[in-house]
Image: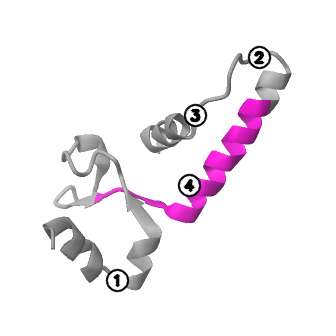
Amino acid sequence: MSKNREVIERRSWWRKHFDDHPGAAARSPDAYVESDTRQTKSRKVYCGACLIADVEQIMKEDLRAVDLGRMTVPRAEHEIKTYRELIN
């Protein structure tokens, strides 16, 4: 069993409902947030259900923008997810 899989299986039940920031695996600075005392850093996570709902809403907005002529093509799901993760 891989080390990542072992870590994921040891997580609390509620932690399985959240996804890690995409930059966490590469230890990117934007994937972490500092504590108020600046002594510790915590990994950013995203609620899986919230991300799905946000992506669906943005996809609907993109389709509406295409219908109105403001966009030529709607964004792909992975583009929206990347955008959402970068702004949070």
Residue type at mark 3 is Ala
Q: Name the residue under label 2.
A: 70
Magenta segment includes 32: no
Which amino acid, mark 1? Ser
- On-image quarter of the N terminus: bottom left
Give left or right: position of 50 versus 38: right
The tag on residue 12 is 1
What residue type is disc 4 on?
Answer: Leu
In the displayed structure, 63 sits above or below 34; it is: above
Residue 10 location (% of width, % of height): 25, 82
Q: Where is mark 4, residue-wise? A: 51
Extent of the magenta region:
43-63
Decide if residue 40 is on the left or right side of residue 45. Answer: left
Taking depth in this image into account, of 42 and 85 the one nearest to the observer is 85
Tag 2 near tag 4, CB within 8 Å: no
Q: Tell me: 29 left or right of 64.
A: left
Crowd band around label 1 with a 10 angstrom C-alpha radius: few (<14), some (14–19), many (20+) = few
